[in-house]
Amino acid sequence: MEEQTERIQENTQEKTEEMKSQQAEEKRKKYREKRAEKEAAEAKQQAEEKLRREKFMRAAIRAAKSGMKKGEVPIGAVVVYENRVVSRGYNRRAEKQLASAHAEMMAIDAACRKFGSWRLPEGCELYVTLEPCPMCMGAALNARVDRLYFGAYEQKGRSLTAALAEANLLNHKTEVTGGVAEAECSALLSGFFSALREKQKAEKAERDARKNSANNPEII
Ligand code: ZN
């Protein structure tokens, strides 16, 4: 009788243990599912944000191309507020013969005029196809741009973007992200410069040929 009671007790205990471990497994499963859901939602949000940034960078690329048609080095910029392009600018240094006529300066000035204020409203973003020079990074800080996205990285280390962003010079933090649609932005510049080199080479060859024919008229 006593043995039987003991066995029953053991069985009950085993069952309780089993139930406990099942419940624990259920809990772990639910936790894993929730974590997977959260990760999927974050990945989705990141993918959407990437697309959003690339969309605005393409607007900056289009601005750069407008400049290129006029013979300028193709660098373009746009200011975005509440997910809308509020101003555009492209490099106009050759046209204006002004050292300050950079794409970012054009876009920032136009945005300031639009808002009627040197201080851009909170949440303004600046997109530029090439990592900004110190002047333009300074202008972005002065205009209180909150986020700056650039495409191609300045290759020759002439930029101080990160240092200026960190320096907190104007007690304003501009968050900087590089490499947005980087391939397209880099291709735009390298395409322009290789075409320019080809053109210069062809012009030099033509000049040399003219010089040679002037020196040696018998060749012709
Ligand atoms: Zn600049």
Image (tube, grey):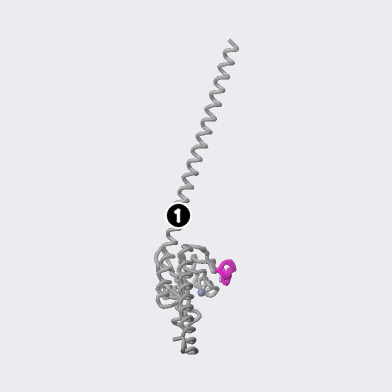
Q: Residue 118 at what x, y percent from top left?
A: 47, 75
Task: Name the element at disc 1.
Answer: helix
- The vertical placement of 185 against 26, above or below, is below
Identify which residue, 82 or 183, lies in the foreground.
183
Left or right: where 191 falls relative to 7: left
Front one among 41 and 13: 41
In the image, 69 versus 86, the foreground residue is 69
Q: Residue furthest top?
A: 1
In front of the other: 154 or 193 = 193
Q: Seen from this angle, which residue lies furthest front?
A: 218
Q: Which residues are magenta?
A: 155-168
Residue 131, how many percent across, how many down?
52, 69
- Count of numbered labels shown in the rendering: 1
Which of the image's four quarters has the C terminus?
bottom left
Q: List the residue tagged with mark 1.
A: 47
- Residue 105 showing in the rendered view: no
The percent coordinates of residue 184 (x first, y second) are 45, 64
> Residue at coordinates 56% horizontally, 26% vertically from top-left?
17
Quadrant of image for the N terminus: top right
Which residue sits at x=40%, y=69%? Answer: 62
Is residue 121 placed above or below 3 in the rendered structure?
below
Q: Is residue 95 magenta?
A: no
Taking the spot 48% from the left edge, 69% from the top edge, the residue there is 190
Q: As displayed, is residue 107 above or below residue 11?
A: below
State left or right for residue 10 relative to residue 119.
Answer: right
Task: Please name the residue shown 48% across and 67% down the image.
Answer: 186
Q: Look at the image and say whether residue 165 sits in the magenta stretch.
A: yes
Q: Position of residue 117 (x, y in %)?
A: 44, 74
Q: Is there any visible trace of residue 201 in the rendered image?
A: yes
Which residue type does callout 1 highlight? Answer: Ala
Circle 1 crowding by C-alpha within 10 Å: few under 14, some 14–19, many from 20: few
Q: Is residue 2 left or right of residue 94?
A: right
